[in-house]
Amino acid sequence: MSYWDAHCHLSDKRLDTAWPAMIQRAQASGITTFLLAGVSPEEWQRQSLLPACCLPVFGLHPWTVIEQDESDLETAFNHLKSQVSRARAIGETGCDFHPRFPKSSHSRQINWLERHLDLANQTQKPVVLHVVRAHGSVLETLKHHPAPNSGLIHSF
């Protein structure tokens, strides 16, 4: 029997030297496929360095949406649209309403989630959602911007 790791960040720059051994250990345990989670254009590029068992996923993480200015987000999203054919899914996108983030960021996060969902619909790609303390808002958003095929929700 084989298994998938359905949400991982093997392309995180902090794992640049660790991922080969991590993949080897996981494969020895029966994990054959790794669905990555994209958070920014720099990270999407690092995904291309990983082996074929690592499936690329491109998106702008809610933390990226909170931290970047609108101009940088527009540039990154245009890059995402130009690279979307390389991605197996759209994400990691979603909403993170943890109290450490200002409430004023909620509408911005929802706006960018909607844009990701619309792109997923246009390209017929599944979505990878990050949802923290925002389940009601994300479910409401999905009513108006339903995911096209399928996807997964990563939340805590």
Image: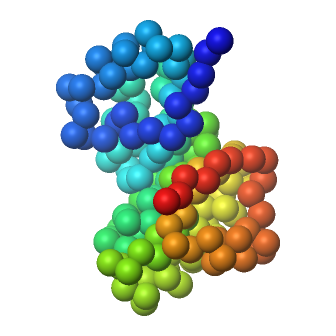
| Residue at (74, 47) in percent of width and height | 150
Label count reads 0
Residue 50 position within the rendered picture, expressed as x and y whole percent measured from the top left: 39, 24
Q: Is residue 147 above or below residue 6?
A: below
Q: How is the image coloured?
A: rainbow
Say whether residue 81 is visible.
no
| Residue at (37, 85) in percent of width and height | 102
Q: Nearer the viewer, residue 88 or 79?
A: 88
Residue 116 falls in image quadrant? bottom right
Q: For this view, does 152 lie left or right of residue 105?
A: right
Say whether residue 52 is visible.
yes
| Residue at (45, 47) in percent of width and height | 38
| Residue at (33, 22) in percent of width and height | 22
Quadrant assignment for the N terminus: top right
Q: Is residue 154 above or below residue 62?
A: above
Q: For this view, does 32 lie left or right of residue 1?
A: left
Residue 42 position within the rendered picture, expressed as x and y whole percent measured from the top left: 32, 47
Residue 61 position within the rendered picture, expressed as x and y whole percent measured from the top left: 44, 59
